[in-house]
Amino acid sequence: MSIYTRILLALDLSDESDQLATKTAKMAEAFGAELNLIHVVEPLSFAYGGDVPMDLTTIQEQLDDHAKTKLDQYAEKVGYPVNRKIIVTGHTETEIHRAAEELNTDLVIVGSHGRHGLALLLGSTANGVLHGAKCDVLAIRVKEED
Ligand code: AMP
């Protein structure tokens, strides 16, 4: 049996997500593993301390729609079947951990910029995902576009 059977790739929908998706799909193919994608939409109220004097529902819905379109595009482009495309609202690390457990994931993949020297090799999200995870976590170094 393959070492990894269910891979969960966390995508932040930045320009680097393309490289991450392509590389992960190749790994999933090599392992013959199920591939799932997740994007977490952080509630806008988080950014404003939860006390926003306006209704953010429409903007939040637009963010969800945008995320859905982008995940559909990645799934189409990678050339490997994507089992589930998860879009969830909440705290990024918490939701990635929750989805990983619900899907019986054995490998979570995140991107890492590695642009701040060794001590800060992992960005804050990648680091947070690594720490609470109950399965292996692989940080793939992403190159920024010039
Ligand atoms: P960061 O630590 O913010 O540079 O992000 C590193 C990696 O964490 C990204 O390449 C993604 O794999 C993951 N990540 C960050 N934000 C999100 C998000 N909102 N949803 C899913 N994955 C994310």
Image (tube, rainbow, N blue to C red):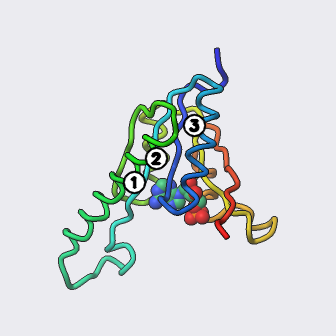
Q: Amino acid at mark 2?
A: Tyr
**Separation (CA) of disc 2 from disc 1:** 6 Å
Residue at mark 2: 74
Tell me if mark 3 has few (under 14), some (14-19) or many (20+) residues whose alpha carbon lies within 10 angstroms of its own: many
Residues at circles 2 and 1 in contact by the CB criterion of under 8 Å: yes
Instruction: Give percent across and percent down for residue 28.
Output: 59, 31
At x 38% / y 42%, what residue is drawn? 85
SS at mark 3?
helix
Q: Tell me: is circle 2 under 8 Å from ligand 1.
A: no
| Foreground residue among 63 and 44 | 63
Instruction: Give percent across and percent down for residue 39.
Output: 43, 53
Residue at mark 1: 70
Residues at circles 3 and 1 in contact by the CB criterion of under 8 Å: no
Image quadrant containing the N terminus: top right
**Separation (CA) of disc 3 from disc 2:** 10 Å
Q: Amino acid at mark 3?
A: Ala
Residue at mark 3: 25
